[in-house]
Image (tube, rainbow, N blue to C red):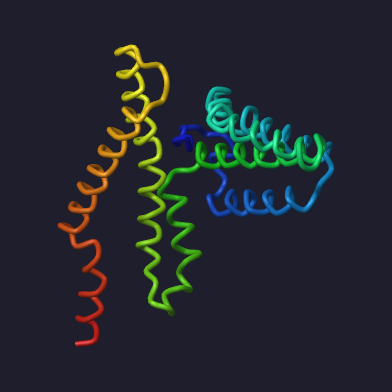
Amino acid sequence: MLSLYVSGTSPVHRAPAGLKLAVLAALGVTLFAIDRLELVAGAFVLVVALGLLGARLPARSLTSQIRSVWIWLAALFCFHLLVTGPLVGAVAVLRLLTLVVAAAVVTATTRVTALVAVIEWLASPLRAFGVRPARIGLVIAMTLRFIPLVADRAARLREAQAARGADRLRLGLVVPLLVQVLRMATTVGEALDARGADDAPARRHRLGTA
């Protein structure tokens, strides 16, 4: 689950959103360009130190990200253990783990509005092809907002299921969650449609060309 913004005054909080996204992208490219375990492990230590010391984030905001993906990382390591070897598996796991923690640091120290503004700026050249950067920013903002909402709904359903004596994940959890997500999507879609989120740019365009 993506972490929400954690207010603070650290240097990482004050850094421009564009710079943090650029560093995150450069980190991803660099990690997949190297295959030495000690270098990847060093990058992981630096990212964790940046989050805990540089951004002054609580440790649980980073460990929660690791808990949410540990089963996938374990499966990835087992796959490499069978196919390539433990060293390659350890490098692959550390790469993804480093990126997960780095992304958590960025989202925890950057407001959604700042992230959306950068994404809209990056997408602005696509206007020449009929793409609306504002719509892309809206999608990103809603995604960042709805991921923790869906996770919260899933946690509530899981608690209710456990209270009834069902401890394992069953279809009885998946179906209600899917229904609630679809209802939320329908409600938000109707609200956006009522506010003219899709038609307003087109109307402005027609007025400008009339």
Q: Which residue is drawn at 35% across and 30% down?
A: 171
Q: Where is residue 43 in the image (x, y as percent from the top left)?
A: 74, 39
Quadrant in the picture for the C terminus? bottom left
What is the quadrant of residue 184 in the picture? top left
What is the quadrant of residue 101 in the picture? top right
Query: Is 154 situated left or right of 61 in this image?
Result: left
- Of residue 67 and residue 127, the one placed in the foreground of this image is 67
Q: Position of residue 53 (x, y in %)?
A: 65, 28
- Picture layout, residue 161 above or below residue 150: above
- Picture layout, residue 159 above or below residue 23: above
Query: Is 106 situated left or right of 127 in this image?
Result: right
Q: Which residue is drawn at 44% across and 62% down?
A: 120
Query: Is 77 situated left or right of 177 in this image?
Result: right
Q: Which residue is drawn at 65% across and 50% down?
A: 23
Q: Residue at x 29, y 41 (%)?
A: 181
Please count the marks in the image.
0
Q: Where is residue 192 in the image (x, y as percent from the top left)?
A: 22, 55
